[in-house]
């Protein structure tokens, strides 16, 4: 089925998310949609798949104009979208997820559904257990389920939104093979990504979006330089990092283990020195987060010892860690890091106090104002934090950190941020590093890991690898290390 | 011109739920076959007909102010402390125990009774808090269960170990010795000390929530407990403290009911004031400055309603209907304004 | 609390537990859709009074039951509308309504206090009654008790075996995903909340017309809260919830049975017992320390323990859903 978008416009107030975008995807092709975060890719695809109403423009399928008011209508018309976080039901089984919402009538038609599910899985080589709860599946497997479900509903256009975030290398190969097979059968596949190498490998045509407009459209073969030029309108400048002399040991893990209901991470041993940057790599749920939580004092060790600057902190409560100069910045900014409902002045007062039992609001406001200036935050002290943009929220989180930290632990510090914000954040982090703070961070961006880390540790299935020198590893090698031990 | 119109608007909006509630109760009275105007008249008369009755209104304000003050603290931390009722009872029980245990006459018996009330209520509140923080039992159920347990405990004591020598009755224990009577005004049941304590409590809570670090921490915990913890506000510790402080204030209310109003322990020592204070908190939008207004309004109804039984043979629960329906329509009209008023603006 | 039944047998326990079954299964359906109806205790009071008053005045039991179910549905609708359409907090609405309905039951029900009234006729089912052991226990009951059996079976089949039941579960777990699949989320929430409310109304009427005949102030106080706790205890599964309801009924009857055997133990212990038990039951089901106990069980035992006792609430319970 051929899809055409004509002059699509979508405005969120003054923000022009889609500013007159036209796109045509032929059936039987894999069409890439490239662009940095905030370029408008997701908005456009949400419009196409019925999740988002649009302000102007037309959608045509096989030449006939269509209008959907809901995702279900879009699926009926033949367009399905695979979200980055698949829209499934974690506690329900794979089969239940497959069946939910299918057809009218009272019966579930389990036997029929089970057969169809197994058939499709076999065809593409997916190993899904129909009776397992979806919560036990990896992200890649959840994607496979959603893909199979959409196909069984007869979609002829499949949109994949950043599908390779958080899946293993074998799963990626499987996915790519599946997409090629689907294209051969005549489906139109739209592959949304910000990863150049994947788009180059998979797509026959690429449309590049920049700031809500089409920056260009090219056919394979592509040149990375050309694509980068269209995405950023500038050449990527390599970042320069100064080497910093390492100080004494700040974090010392001695055969430490963390055990939870879902995952055990055993036998972690690591020494981190002041001024060092350690990058943690690996798929979601492989243990990095647990390790970071343990180092921050938010998760108890089941075995082993943890020392901060020589002090045994193994059984100490969280506030002792804060006193010892350890800080943790979570990835979910509004859910775990900031408090929606409080403004910046209140955050400042909460975190650093204003001396004494009573709050000195003038003092807090002045300090919040200084924070805004120092960190280039777009906002004012009385602004509620949920009103800040994602990038500004991240800056606020960093700004609220106390000075002179011994150990700074960051979970996905630049997730969802555009290149400029990423550079700016790392600038600030490296400044702290120069002042002696040791940094521990996770990222799914392999290039970011290699660029900023001194050493990289790979987590896989709860096992921590030995640290690898970041200067001596390539992106491919790192990718294999991450995906290597996964099934 | 605009300023006075907008403030008039505000007043009208604030009173709208009251009007609708009066209308609703009007209908309920009609269904019950009663004369609504006579009923309303009786309630007002019941509260205002004499200076002694006015004093009674103030008497009713005391437990309501104290419980609401305490409830504001737990509400700020995002907790539904329905156990306030039981915490009131616990304070009264602790006070009664102390009075029975101390040999008479005892200098400082009254201050000690106040302390007993604070401690008893605080402990009962802590119990609910512990169940919540360490047992993951929702504080609604923990509080409720403990309310019923406290009430049963009261009955047991009144009909058992603490029963009057002549025999147990529904009137409660024997009256307290005079040394344990909180002094009241002549000709009225109002204890100035109790009223001062109540007003001081609500004032203190206002300052606490607005201008102290602890208040800010509670507010943070109520909005986002996970982030609050990361930012350094220990959730467990602060929640338990909130339960304890709220329990203490509620316990004080119970204690004062025993020593200033009834001068004995009766089965219904808490009188529903605990549950009522939660309505007060809702109606005042959890703002301490509005609490006294709502408390006064509720107390008038509380004092006036028993007259319905005397004069019109109507059940005094009409007062409760008025109070609860004001709260209900407050929520509904606020919702209507929020959802459908947006389209105008 | 139940005193009208002289013989404490299993059959009597089943009969006495019927209101709890209706109320807790009704609330289970409501919560599965993602709505908490905290007004249960007040609603049961109000519907018990309504059922009795209407049956008393009209002479028709059926009318009494229908009136009670209608009242229960209306109260539940207020909770639904106030939270879904008006965006107010479900807990606040439920709590206010519980107080309001309790007071209304006292006020409107005043003239009917301690009046003798109609009761549901005893209807042993011929043939089935003769089945050894099960017969006299299960089939020698009032009509409403048979209805309670039906409610358990139908609700279980509906939730686990039908497509609409699957949709219900989806709405409660992840409304955005359900919406993406074309399920009318808000309509589903309204529907099941009102249905649950009607079942709660049925519970109230059953109380005043079958289990504890008549009406008095605070006739049924506490039952609603226990029903809410049973929903949690039963892990939101109709069968486990029904089991919880019968378990509680049995424990309460055990209390009345044991009272004469232990004259020294004050009656208040038995009054307080259901609520202390409620807290203990919730501790068992929600507490972290039982999770730690799980570590020491073999995997098979762990799975069994989990299936029987642990349960997670529907993930979207109490959370508003705004399709953007």
Image (tube, coloured by chain):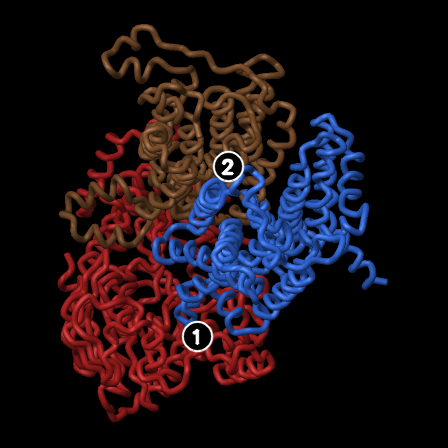
Give the structural element (helix, strand or loop) at label 2.
helix
Residue A302: give x, y in percent of width and height. 19, 66
Residue B303: give x, y in percent of width and height. 71, 45
**Chain ID, brown in image:** C
Q: Between residues B176 and C202, which one lies in front from this camera angle?
A: B176
Mark 1 against mark 2, which lies toward the viewer?
2
Residue at (34%, 25%) from the top-left corner?
A: C153
Q: Between residues B213 and A155, which one lies in front from this camera angle?
A: B213
Q: The numbered mark 2 sits on a residue in which chain?
A: C
Residue at (49%, 41%) from the top-left corner?
A: B155
**How far is disc 1 from disc 2 in space, using C-alphas?**
45 Å
Q: Between residues C225 and C193, which one lies in front from this camera angle?
A: C225
Residue at (80%, 56%) from the top-left corner?
A: B8
Q: Indicate whether C140 appears above or below A381.
A: above
Q: Indicate whether B195 appears above or below B319.
A: below
Is residue A64 something one can see in this rendering?
Answer: no
Quarter of the figure with residue B255: bottom right
Residue at (16%, 60%) from the top-left corner?
A: A486
Q: Which residue ends up furthest to the right in the rendered image? A: B1
Is residue B88 something one can see in this rendering?
Answer: yes
Asked whether, in this view, residue A479 is left or right of residue B307, the answer is left
Residue on which disc 1 sits: A397
Q: Between residues A265 and B292, which one lies in front from this camera angle?
A: B292
Q: Indicate whether B156 appears above or below B224.
A: above
Asked whether, in this view, residue B121 is left or right of residue B339, the answer is left
Residue A128: give x, y in percent of width and height. 20, 45
Give the structural element (helix, strand or loop) at label 1.
helix
Residue on which disc 2 sits: C41
**Chain ID, red in image:** A
* Rendered shade, chain B: blue
């Amino acid at each position: 089925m051929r899809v055409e978008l004509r002059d699509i416009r979508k405005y969120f107030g003054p923000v022009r998310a889609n500013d007159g975008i036209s796109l045509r995807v032929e059936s039987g092709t894999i069409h890439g949609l490239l662009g940095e975060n905030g370029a408008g890719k997701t908005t456009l695809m949400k419009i196409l798949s019925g999740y988002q109403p649009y302000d102007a423009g037309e959608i045509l399928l096989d030449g006939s104009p269509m209008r959907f008011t809901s995702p279900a209508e879009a699926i009926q018309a033949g367009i399905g979208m695979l979200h980055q976080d698949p829209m499934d039901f974690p506690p329900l089984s794979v089969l239940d997820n497959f069946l939910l919402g299918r057809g009218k009538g009272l019966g579930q038609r389990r036997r029929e559904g089970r057969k169809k599910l197994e058939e499709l899985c076999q065809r593409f080589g997916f190993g899904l257990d129909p009776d397992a709860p979806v919560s036990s599946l990896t992200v890649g497997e959840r994607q496979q389920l959603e893909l199979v479900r959409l196909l069984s509903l007869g979609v002829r256009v499949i949109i994949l939104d950043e599908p390779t975030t958080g899946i293993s290398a074998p799963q990626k190969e499987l996915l790519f093979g599946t997409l090629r097979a689907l294209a051969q059968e005549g489906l139109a596949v739209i592959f949304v990504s910000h990863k150049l190498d994947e788009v180059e490998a998979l797509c026959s045509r690429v449309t590049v979006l920049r700031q809500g407009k089409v920056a260009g459209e090219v056919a394979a073969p592509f040149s990375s330089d050309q694509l980068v030029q269209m995405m950023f309108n500038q050449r990527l400048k390599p970042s320069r990092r100064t080497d910093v002399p390492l100080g004494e040991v700040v974090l010392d893990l001695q055969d430490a283990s963390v055990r939870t209901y879902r995952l055990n991470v055993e036998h972690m041993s690591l020494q981190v020195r002041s001024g060092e940057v350690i990058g943690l790599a690996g798929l979601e749920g492989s243990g990095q987060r647990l390790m970071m939580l343990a180092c921050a004092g938010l998760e108890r060790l089941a075995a082993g010892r943890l020392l901060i600057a020589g002090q045994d902190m193994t059984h100490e409560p969280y506030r002792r860690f804060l006193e010892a100069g350890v800080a943790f910045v979570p990835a979910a900014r509004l859910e775990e890091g900031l408090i929606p409902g409080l403004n910046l002045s209140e955050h400042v007062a909460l975190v650093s106090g204003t001396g004494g039992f009573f709050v000195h609001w003038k003092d807090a406001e002045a300090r919040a104002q200084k924070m805004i200036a120092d960190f280039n935050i777009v906002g004012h002290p009385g602004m509620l934090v949920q009103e800040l943009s994602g990038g500004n929220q991240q800056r606020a989180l960093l700004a609220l950190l106390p000075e002179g930290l011994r150990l700074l632990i960051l979970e996905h510090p630049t997730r969802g941020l555009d290149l400029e914000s990423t550079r700016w954040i790392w600038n600030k982090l490296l400044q702290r590093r120069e002042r002696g703070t040791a940094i521990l961070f996770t990222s799914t961006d392999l290039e970011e890991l290699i660029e900023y880390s001194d050493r990289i540790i790979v987590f896989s299935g709860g096992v921590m690898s030995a640290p690898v020198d970041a200067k001596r590893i390539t992106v491919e090698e790192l990718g294999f290390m991450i995906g290597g031990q996964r099934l | 011109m605009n300023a006075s119109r907008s403030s008039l608007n505000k007043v009208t909006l604030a009173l709208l739920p009251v009007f609708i509630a009066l209308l609703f109760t009007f209908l309920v009275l009609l269904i019950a076959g009663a004369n609504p105007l006579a009923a309303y008249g009786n309630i007002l008369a019941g509260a205002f007909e004499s200076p002694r009755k006015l004093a009674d209104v103030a008497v009713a304000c005391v437990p309501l102010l104290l419980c609401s003050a305490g409830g504001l603290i737990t509400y700020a931390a995002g907790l539904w402390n329905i156990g306030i009722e039981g915490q009131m009872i616990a304070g009264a029980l602790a006070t009664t125990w102390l009075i029975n245990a101390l040999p008479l006459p005892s200098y400082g018996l009254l201050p000690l009774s106040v302390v007993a009330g604070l401690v008893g209520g605080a402990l009962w509140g802590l119990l609910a808090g512990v169940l919540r923080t360490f047992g993951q039992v929702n504080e609604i159920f923990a509080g409720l269960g403990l309310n019923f347990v406290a009430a049963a405990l009261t009955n047991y004591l009144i009909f058992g170990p603490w029963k009057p020598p002549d025999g147990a009755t529904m009137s409660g224990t024997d009256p307290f010795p005079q040394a344990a009577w909180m002094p009241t005004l002549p000709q009225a049941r109002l204890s100035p000390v109790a009223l001062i304590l109540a007003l001081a409590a609500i004032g203190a809570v206002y300052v606490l929530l607005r201008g102290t670090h602890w208040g800010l921490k509670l507010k943070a915990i109520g909005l986002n407990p996970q982030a609050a913890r990361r930012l350094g506000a220990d959730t467990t510790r602060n929640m338990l403290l909130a339960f304890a402080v709220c329990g203490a204030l509620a316990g004080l209310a119970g204690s004062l009911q025993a020593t200033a109003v009834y001068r004995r322990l009766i089965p219904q020592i808490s009188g529903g004031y605990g549950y009522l204070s939660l309505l007060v908190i809702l109606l005042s939008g959890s703002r301490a400055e509005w609490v006294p207004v709502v408390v006064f309004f509720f107390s008038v109804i509380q004092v006036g309603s028993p007259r319905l039984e005397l004069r019109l043979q109507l059940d005094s629960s009409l007062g409760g209907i008025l109070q609860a329906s004001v709260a209900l329509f407050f929520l509904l009209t606020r919702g209507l304004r929020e959802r459908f008023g947006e389209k105008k603006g | 609390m139940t005193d009208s039944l002289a013989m404490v047998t299993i059959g009597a326990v089943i009969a006495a537990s019927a209101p709890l079954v209706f109320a807790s299964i009704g609330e289970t359906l409501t919560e599965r859709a993602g709505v908490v109806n905290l007004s249960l205790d007040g609603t049961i009071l109000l519907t018990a009074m309504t059922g009795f008053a209407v049956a008393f005045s009209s002479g028709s039991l059926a009318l009494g039951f229908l009136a009670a179910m209608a009242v229960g549905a209306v109260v539940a609708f207020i909770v639904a509308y106030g939270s879904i359409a008006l965006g107010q907090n479900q807990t606040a609405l439920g709590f206010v309504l519980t107080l309001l309905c309790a007071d209304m039951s006292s006020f409107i029900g005043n003239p009917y206090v301690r009046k003798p009234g109609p009761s549901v006729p005893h209807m042993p089912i011929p043939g089935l009654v003769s089945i050894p052991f099960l017969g006299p226990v299960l089939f020698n009951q009032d009509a409403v008790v048979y209805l309670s059996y039906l409610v358990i079976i139908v609700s279980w089949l509906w939730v686990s075996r039908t497509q609409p039941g699957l949709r219900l579960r989806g709405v409660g777990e992840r409304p955005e995903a359900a919406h993406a699949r074309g399920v009318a989320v808000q309509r589903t929430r309204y529907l099941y909340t009102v249905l649950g409310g009607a079942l709660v109304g049925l519970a109230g009427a059953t109380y005043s017309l079958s289990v504890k005949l008549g009406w008095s102030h605070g006739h049924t106080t506490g039952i609603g809260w226990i029903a809410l706790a049973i929903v949690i205890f039963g892990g939101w599964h109709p069968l486990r919830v029904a089991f919880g309801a019968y378990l509680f009924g049995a424990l309460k009857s055990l209390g009345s049975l044991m009272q004469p055997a232990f004259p020294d133990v004050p009656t208040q212990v038995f009054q307080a017992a259901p609520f202390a038990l409620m807290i203990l039951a919730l501790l068992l089901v929600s507490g972290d320390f039982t999770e730690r106990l799980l570590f020491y069980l073999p995997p098979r035992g762990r799975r069994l323990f989990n299936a029987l006792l642990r349960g997670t609430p529907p993930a979207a319970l109490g959370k508003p859903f705004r399709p953007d």
